[in-house]
Amino acid sequence: MKPLVIRKLIVDERNELFDAQGMRLAVFPSVYEKIRDYAAEILADCPSAFREGSLLEQQLSEILKNGIKHGNRRDPRKKLRVWYDLRKRARFIVEDEGEGFAELDAWNDFYRRRQTALHEEDFDAFLAMASYRGPRSDEEDGGNSLVAALEYWNGGMIYNAARNKVGVVRWFTGGSGT
Amino acid sequence: MEWTVAEQGEGGVEIRIKGDCDLYHAPAFARDILAGIERGWRSVRVDAAELAYLDSTGVGAFIRILQALKSRGGRLSTRGLRGSPRRVIEMSNIIALLGDEGAGEVRR
């Protein structure tokens, strides 16, 4: 049996992942239909070794989507600020103008129960809770982006105290960043 | 994203998906397949060999399809999952639920 792995979304206002010194900044209106275009624009000069097929674009798009859909509620008047640094690793800070991810603790509890069911091979229970539903979730939301994100961002995924800004980093082994 | 459905009788269907199953296209895909399940589909096999991109909305679509089938005593299987879409499924911890038949042995 595989070991039980339970990760957590962490709040740490002073975490070094929020140090934007030397990072580039892009600012976008919260237009849902352009999320993947924004990700492509940010990654235009990304080293190919970091892309891992479409994986980096997909994971960045998920963070942009969370900010635009859940944070800024798709209001194009509200901005999404994205700091990024693609030297040696892929590092991003994404800030929206919303009220913050209030259900962060509830999501951590959901994730713990989900992982425990998987570990115990209780697939009925796992499937029953395979999607997270918060107070504002719609049928397309499932918390799956965060499940994958916790594994993908192997250098950390940290929220600020207001929970409207997230810092992430992924290190690559064997890659050759610029 | 495109998908084609081949009905095989007795509630069995094979669905070939192609392109990007993403936040823009996955909701329509889910609605179409869920409608088929409402009409009586019970054994759904998804050929994902030409799936180029999958995001969390696409993962959510697979979960909703799986839940709908399971609640009706049906089953879902997948084959041809590879590359980035397979990694997304693996990182979402649902590969064990999808009746995965592996990345190879893809019919053309």
Image: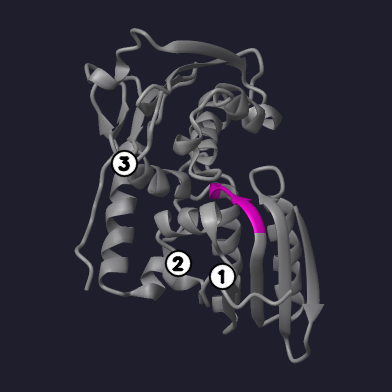
Residue shown at 46%/55% (left/top)?
B87
Marks 2 and 3: which is nearer the front? 3
Gap in angstroms between the C-alphas marked 2 and 3:
24 Å
Pick whichever of labels 1 and 2 is earlier in the sequence: 1
> In terms of secondary structure, what is the magenta stretch mainly?
strand
The reply to whether the magenta stretch includes residue A30 is: no
How far apart are the two marked residues, 1 and 2, measured between alpha carbons? 12 Å
Q: How many marks?
A: 3
User: Could you say where residue A164 lies in the image, as x and y percent from the top left?
Assistant: 41, 22
- In this picture, is A110 found above or below A12? below
Q: Amino acid at mark 2?
A: Ile
- The correct choice, above or below, for A10 with respect to A27 in the image is below
Across and down, in percent, residue A170 comes to 35, 35
Q: Quadrant of the C terminus of chain B?
A: bottom right
- Residue type, mark 3 in image: Thr
- State the SS at label 2: helix
Residue in the picture at 29% in, 38% down: A9
Q: Are marks 2 and 3 in contact (CB under 8 Å)?
A: no
Q: Which residue is mark 2?
A: B95
Write the residue at 46% across / 11% down: A24
Q: What are the residue bounds of the magenta stretch?
A: B51-56
- Reading the image, the residue beneath label 1 is B66
Tell me the distance, in whole angstroms, between the alpha carbons under discs 3 and 1.
35 Å
